[in-house]
Image (spheres, rainbow, N blue to C red):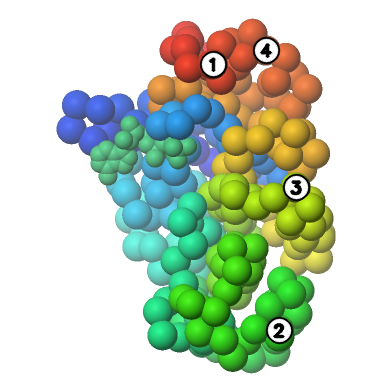
Amino acid sequence: MLQLENVTVRFGGLTAVNDVTLAVGTGDLVGLVGANGAGKTTLFNAISGLVRPTTGRILFNGADVLKAPMYQRARMGIGRTFQIPQPMHELTVRQNLEVAQRFGTGSVDKRRIDEILDFTNLAAKAGRDASSGLALTELKALEVAKALSTNPKLLLLDEVLAGLETSGKRNFMNMLKDLHAKFSVGILIIEHDIETISNLCQRVAVLNFGGMIAEGTPAEVFNNPAVIKSYTGGEVDHA
Ligand SMILES: Nc1ncnc2c1ncn2[C@@H]1O[C@H](COP(=O)(O)OP(=O)(O)OP(=O)(O)O)[C@@H](O)[C@H]1O
């Protein structure tokens, strides 16, 4: 479904993403990990169309997406969340979903929105002001709900579990597993917590100073000495 081929993103003299090649298949659940500043969000920005790679190719279902603007990539099936929840101010929860869905599909499907509100446990809050009436877990759920409303085939989830306490995190993780099955959506998720990634993902890719240093099952990756070194802040040779 998604193929990254030798993707590099430079900001002036800084190489934020360095020659990354990665594939995410239909229905895959893949973790993307790495220390702060490793290039994870920049890679998401390159996939979703917020930044343009300096070199490399990004294919989605065989089509080169690099010339497509964000809304077109959303309409092709690439959905994403943001690390810091970004509800649209002075709009209700439901209106947030409607705007996101129009952006990502070109129209509003109220039945799908009702289904997503139920699924993400936001139905009771549908009429609330999204920027002032929600707790952190609900704001995170709204990020996921907005992305889901665009009928994605691939969801890019940027630290949606960060900041949640243990039981909230467990519930949210179960919701993501259900979502993966119910909506037949592939997931690429950025997350720092090793236990969470091990529980959730079939495969993990590790970035270190922009380069991919390991890819494999959670057990393979988290026992890899280079990965352990990178987690403690060291730069290691790229795979
Ligand atoms: N628009 C930008 N202009 C210049 N530098 C940028 C820009 N966006 C990101 N960077 C830099 O690129 C590098 C990678 O940042 P990025 O946010 O992708 O890392 P990350 O792995 O997502 O980190 P974190 O876990 O802290 O979110 C960092 O050095 C960051 O300062």
| Nearer to us in this view, 57 or 206 | 206
Q: Nearer the viewer, mark 2 or mark 3?
A: 3
In this rendering, the answer to whether 191 lies above or below 104 is: above
The residue singled out by tag 3 in the image is: 166
In this rendering, the answer to whether 75 lies above or below 14 is: below
Distance between the Cα atoms at labels 2 and 3?
23 Å
Q: Are marks 2 and 1 in contact (CB under 8 Å)?
A: no
Q: Which mark is residue 123?
A: 2
Ligand 1, seen in the image, is in the quarter at: top left
The residue singled out by tag 1 in the image is: 232
Q: Does the beta carbon of the residue at mark 3 sit less than 8 Å from ligand 1?
A: no
In this rendering, the answer to whether 29 lies above or below 11 is: below
Callout 1: 10 Å neighbours few (<14), some, many (20+)? few
Q: Is residue 2 left or right of residue 119?
A: left
Kindly identify the amino acid type of the residue bearing the numbered disc 4: Asn
Kindly identify the amino acid type of the residue bearing the numbered disc 2: Ala
Q: Which mark is residue 224?
A: 4
Q: Are marks 3 and 1 in contact (CB under 8 Å)?
A: no
Callout 2: 10 Å neighbours few (<14), some, many (20+)? some
- The numbered mark, 1 or 4, whose residue comes first in the sequence reads 4
Distance between the Cα atoms at labels 2 and 4?
43 Å
Res. 96 in view: yes
* Rendered residue at 30%/27% (across/down): 15
